[in-house]
Each structure stands twice: as C-alpha cells, then as structure tokens.
Amino acid sequence: MAKLSRLDPSLSGHSSGLVLFDTLNGYLHPVDATKGAFLAERKIIEKLKLLLDGARGVGMTVFYPSGAHAVDDADSVDRLTDTDMDLREGGGRDKPIRPHFHRGSKDAEIVPELAPARGDIVVPKQRWSSFYQTNLDLQLRVREIGTIIIAGGSTDVGIASTVFAARDLDYGIVVVRDACYSTRGPNHDFFMDRVFPRMARVVTAEQAVSLMIR
C-alpha cells in the first residue's frame, strides 16, 4: 500500500476507493414516509450519485459493503441492550435487536440510482463494520488502495464502525459529511464534529469530487 496516498490531499483514482455503505432500497427508499422525507430533504441519494459519478470519471473502484443477513437470522446474535436501534425502549429478551432486511429481498438490493458497474465490488457483510470477516481489506490491498472515501448510513452505526476499523488498519480516510446520515437526533453532527476529525478528513460531496484525480 503506498504510504504517500494517505498524506496526499488529492484523491487518486488509482490509490483511492469510494465506499458506498449500505446503499440499499430498504434504507434509501424506506416505507416510513418520515424517514423518506428526511433523506429527500438532505438530498442523500443525489449526493451519493455525485460521488459515484466523480469516482467513475477518474477510474476509481467503488465498493458496496451491503448487509446480507440470513432470512432466519441464523447469522445474527441476540443480545441484551438498553434500547432498540432508534434509542426507544427495547433490546430486551423478548424483543432483541435484529437485522431489518434480509438477503434475497428487494429491500436488501442496492438502489438502482447507484447500481454497481463492471469492476465494482459488492461486499456482503453480517455486522456493522464493512471490514469484520469480509474481504474488503483484501480487495483494497490487492488494488494498492491506501485511502477510502466513505458515505452512506447510518453515521453512528455502520459508518462509525467502518471508520474505526479502517483507522486501525492504517487506511487514509475521507468521510463525506453531507452524504452520510443518521435519523437519531444529534448523533450525525457529534461524529462529524467531535469524533471523525481525529481519524479522517471530513468533507462535503462537492469537496470530495473536486479532490478526485486520475
């Protein structure tokens, strides 16, 4: 892995990769009208498409870490938590947190607006982190990619878990603030303002595209 790529402010199409996290129908085209309005107001799909088009333009490989959970939840583990995923009452023995969407369903498919192209890499995952027991690290290293640009949702769940893992694996990291999201109160801004700047560069989608070079 080229060390220079982690210190160079530009984002080379050869040594950088775009990571579109959980860009699935169930998340980006939700049944819940309130969540749909939340995403539309922030133009999340448009920002992700801007990044995707920018990456395509400089020959950058795009990676799609995507939840691929067994229909019977056999690859999930029930655990006691204080709340459910939306910080409401839940997480007990009678109502453990389980995956929302399952492998093979329409909800678990990547949205058509961001469909993978030839040469892109879909990375099935069963945990929050894009790296835990997946081949993402291998796919990046064989391409000599030293920096990842990450976007998608949720900021305080899969994005955070992936950024922490990437940092410990010594990748350069660029987090795209306005192309990530969380519906859980101030969590998005907390991570973007107080956590990620110590591990990564935090930029807008337009800024990220402006840094992309061949």
Image: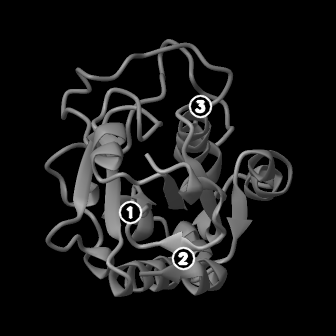
Identify residue for label 1. Answer: 23
Q: Give the percent coordinates (x, y) of residue 147.
A: 51, 55
Q: Is residue 126 left or right of residue 184?
A: left
Q: How is the image coloured?
A: one colour
Q: Is residue 173 left or right of residue 100?
A: right
Measuring 72% from the left and 63% from the top, which residue is drawn there? Answer: 202
Q: Quadrant of the C terminus?
A: bottom left
Identify residue for label 3. Answer: 168
Q: Give the percent coordinates (x, y) of residue 80.
A: 56, 13
Quarter of the figure with residue 163: top right
As drawn, 31 above or below 103: below
Q: Is residue 15 left or right of residue 85?
A: left
In this view, the mark in front (3 or 2): 3
Separation of residues labelled 3 and 2 (CA atoms): 28 Å
Q: Which mark is residue 206?
A: none
Amino acid type, label 2 = Ile
Instruction: Please tell me which residue lies in front, 104 or 173.
Output: 173
Q: Earlier in the sequence, mark 2 or mark 1?
A: 1
Measuring 18% from the left and 34% from the top, which residue is drawn there? Answer: 71
In this view, the mark in front (1 or 3): 3
Q: Are marks 3 and 2 in contact (CB under 8 Å)?
A: no
**In what element is the residue under mark 2?**
helix
Separation of residues labelled 2 and 1 (CA atoms): 10 Å
Q: Which mark is residue 44?
A: 2
**In what element is the residue under mark 3?**
helix
Q: Give the percent coordinates (x, y) of residue 77.
A: 38, 17
Amino acid type, label 1 = Thr
